[in-house]
Amino acid sequence: MTDIASASHGKLDLGRVVRDTLAVTGKRPGFVLGLSALLAGVPSFLGGLLTGRHLHSPSDIFFSGFGLLHMVVMLFATSFLAASLYSLSLSELEGETPTPQEVFRRGGQMFLPLLGLNILFFLGVLAGMILLVVPGVILALMWCVSGPALMAEQAGITESFRRSTDLTRGHRWMLFAVFLLFFIAQAFVQSVLGAVGLAASFGSLDIFSVPRVFGSALIATATTALAYPGVTAIYLQLKELNAAAP
């Protein structure tokens, strides 16, 4: 599905990223959307309902036995599903058609390293945001393909961060534009669904009403179904550009 010859003049091809992303999602929509719903939609829906229920005592969510158990289970489950979705995207973009068993087997092998990488990614970007927003954004752009790099190259966590830093060098302004456009589109869809949810809630301003929480879960599912294949498509194209560079 990828084509080295399509890399144009050493620059990231946004059109190709979009085509590859939609190709993965469109080829196996049920599988991709199912994984995305489990990875993001269901946690978003349950988290919204749980937050609404404990709105006046939010500490109950984090310090109750159920809340802590829920967070631990979701942390491991989402890492497993994220590893599976990366695995599926990599295989499809490289012209393979893995079975669900193969996808989940690969996810099971790599979810713990991916969990560690995601935690360090979050802490690093958060520290950059706290010190000053710009360093956090730069780190996020530098490390944005560390996840697929870890999955594809089976390198260690530190090496995956280094690999992502090398691959994104010279392309970070384009990546910034890609992610900015993605977030703008997401915000637009969220505002539309928010208006629909408001109408379905009969004008209630409760952001944790079931229709609005359900709408947020739909957005989370759709975003995830595009984000993981999209980041994987970016990684593979950057890898080709890096290999073709003199």
Image: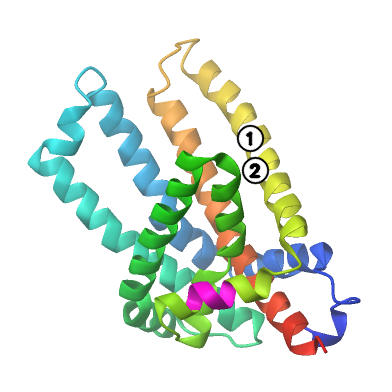
Q: Position of residue 132 (x, y in %)?
A: 54, 40
Q: According to the image, label 2 marks what residue?
A: 183
At x 38% / y 27%, what residue is drawn?
Answer: 210
Give the spatial CA distance, label 2 vs label 1.
6 Å
At x 27% / y 62%, what residue is drawn?
Answer: 76
At x 61% / y 54%, what residue is drawn?
Answer: 138
Residue 109 placement: quadrant: bottom left
Q: Is residue 244 left or right of 164 when viewed as pictured?
A: right
Q: Is residue 24 above or below residue 177?
A: below
At x 42% / y 71%, what residue is drawn?
Answer: 83
Q: Main secondary structure of the magenta part?
A: helix
Q: Is residue 211 left or right of 108 when viewed as pictured?
A: right
Amino acid type, residue under disc 1 in the picture: Ala
Q: Residues within 10 Å of mark 2 (few under 14, many from 20)?
A: few
Question: Which numbered disc covers residue 22?
Answer: none
Amino acid type, residue under disc 2 in the picture: Phe
Query: Would residue 131 be counted in the magenta stretch?
Result: no
- Magenta region, residue range: 160-164
Question: Which numbered disc covers residue 187?
Answer: 1
Q: Position of residue 155 (x, y in %)?
A: 45, 85
User: Which residue is more in the foreground, 77 or 4?
Assistant: 4
Marks 2/1 in contact by CB < 8 Å: the verdict is: yes
Q: Is residue 181 above or below residue 6?
A: above
Which secondary structure, mark 1? helix
User: Which residue is more in the foreground, 218 or 83?
Assistant: 83
Q: Is residue 91 above or below residue 207?
A: below
Q: Residue furthest right?
A: 9
Q: Quadrant of the C terminus?
A: bottom right
Q: Position of residue 1 (x, y in %)?
A: 73, 82
Marker count (numbered)? 2
Query: Would residue 161 be counted in the magenta stretch?
Result: yes
Q: Is residue 3 left or right of 125 when viewed as pictured?
A: right
